[in-house]
Amino acid sequence: MASAAGTAAAPKTSAQHRVNVNVGVLGHIDSGKTALARALSTVASTAAFDRAPQSRARGITLDLGFSCFCTELPPHLGLGPGQLQFTLVDCPGHASLIRTIIGGAQIIDLMMLVIDITKGMQTQSAECLVIGQIACQKMIVVLNKIDLLPEGKRQAAIEKMMKKMQKTLENTKFHGCPIVAVAAKPGGPEAPETLALIGISELIEVLKSAAYLPARDPSGSFLMAVDHCFSIKGQGTVMTGTILSGSVGIGDNVEIPALKVTKKVKSMQMFHTPVTYAMQGDRVGVCVTQFDPKLLERGLICTPESLQTIHAAIISLKKIQYFRGTLQTKAKFHITVGHETVMGRVMFFSPAPDDFSKEPLENEFDFDKEYLYQEEYLSEESKSSEENKENDQTGERQFPKQQWALLEFEKPVTCPKLCLVIGSKLDTDIHANTCRLAFHGVLLEGMEEKNYIETCLSKLKVYKLKHKEGQVERLCDDYSVIGRSLFKKETNIQIFVGLKVKLSTDGVRPETKALLTAISKKKPKAGKGDTAKEDESNKVDSTQPVHITLLFKRYVFDAQKKMIQS
């Protein structure tokens, strides 16, 4: 794991390693996340600890704050002597700022879920847990503010809350994760700094034991999530952020794709230490010249021309189990793609029914296959649509192993391929006790052309199954019947000429003729019952009408609206 960045940051001996692990600090508003980050940190980055004046005034974090602290490398990493650097990403807990939390969660290796022990799990704690499950591999639960518990009952209350949290995490990927009780700011925000912290050294030991070597790859295109941008007089403009992929060095050209501007890297720092090179996972400040910092508060910078700016996308997705209700086609969601959140409209589709049980195709999309349009994402809560009823011969509902959505954005977004996508209903009342995160997925295909409907969607073979039904009035011959109610009065019947129909009697059989004869016969008058008598073997239920069914499929993006029968 030694890199030029690591060597520059820890110059004592060339053999020393410096491993960086990004730790997300997430939780409900007022759970004490910033106080915890401050208690743990030794070096605060420019963005750390609530730089916004309204944030300081209200005592809440409005933006991602970054800070770090170092310990010796634990033996289980097997790297010998060196430093383990924990970069703390303090995510805001305010409900309306969930966009920022999602942005922060995409750059973390390990998560601390901070819980106010006097309140337990709250709405945003649950949402942070959901984001963690999507974007993170490991978690530590931190029960904060234990100093507010009466000393005599403190231990019993901590044990009770630990059991509660274990139960909450039972059915998540984090079951059995460590739970640590602390007081990051004993006495509250106004208390003097001299009061002794409780549990912080134990938490550092747990963090060290949970640390792992995150997969880091310096190859490929450089991509960095910028969270702050500011100018330094006489130096230039510094963009601080976390490298999501690839690497960067002094003298490299980097593009700010949202502005279509390319700049040369003049100098770089990692937590106030000058470096010449940084790679995936590193938190770094990149200095460029002649760039107005007001133009970029948050966004992406990258290797020139390596990112796409897209108007629509195809994603593979899964519904978030805690989201109440169904996911409807044509509904609008807040779509977080990369580090941008925009409004977008969705259309759900699934494999053709015969392919429901096929294994999912990872990280690619096949335009040659046919897909079935869905009125909503198929799950236990969804209603069985006409298409699915038609396909479901067994009567038992089946669900595909993979589902997709077409996202159409209200404004273009810049993002890498295969990036994380989260769909939310952020306009839900922030005080409602409900999860606003609806689905998550992976971006498989981006559509860069403005006229993507003509250029891209015409290749997307998503079809609807159409079903028309009428009744037979009379039989003309073995191949012709006269029917009613199959079409509306205003329908242009010419476009249906040549399509095959089915009869409910499975063709024109002797029984069909007998049935239609019986239906068309007038009821016999009283006293003439003998003439109506028929042979027992030819008896039919004349109250049963014979149905005509017309089945065909129509491709959603076919401009000619052709009708196809297989």
Image (spheres, helix red, strand yellow):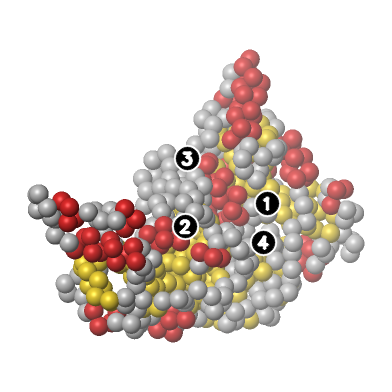
The residue sitting at 21% across, 60% down in the picture is: 519
Q: Give how far across and how far down residue 229 sits, in percent.
A: 54, 66
Please give the residue where the numbered disc 4 appears in the rendered image. 283
- Amino acid found under the numbered disc labelled 3: Thr
Of 496 and 193, nearer the camera is 496
SS for callout 1:
loop
Q: Quick check: 488 left or right of 91?
A: left
Of 80 and 403, nearer the camera is 403
Q: Going from the N terminus, do you reach mark 1 or mark 3 first? A: 3
Q: CA distance from mark 1 to mark 2?
A: 38 Å
- Disc 1 crowd rating (10 Å Cα; few below 14, some 14-19, many 20+) is few
Q: Quick check: 101 left or right of 468?
A: right
Q: Quick check: 155 left or right of 412?
A: right
Please give the residue where the numbered disc 1 appears in the rendered image. 137
Of 409 and 369, nearer the camera is 369
Q: Are marks 1 and 2 in contact (CB under 8 Å)?
A: no
Count of number-bearing discs: 4
Q: Give how far across and how far down residue 145 sits, in percent.
A: 58, 31
Q: Are marks 3 and 2 in contact (CB under 8 Å)?
A: no
Q: CA distance from mark 1 to mark 3?
A: 22 Å
Q: CA distance from mark 4 to mark 3?
A: 30 Å
Mark closer to the observer (4, 1): 1
The residue sitting at 37% across, 59% down in the picture is: 386
Please give the residue where the numbered disc 2 appears in the rendered image. 392
Up/down of 71 relative to 344, above or below? above
Q: CA distance from mark 4 to mark 2?
A: 52 Å
Please give the residue where the numbered disc 3 appears in the rendered image. 123
SS for callout 2:
loop
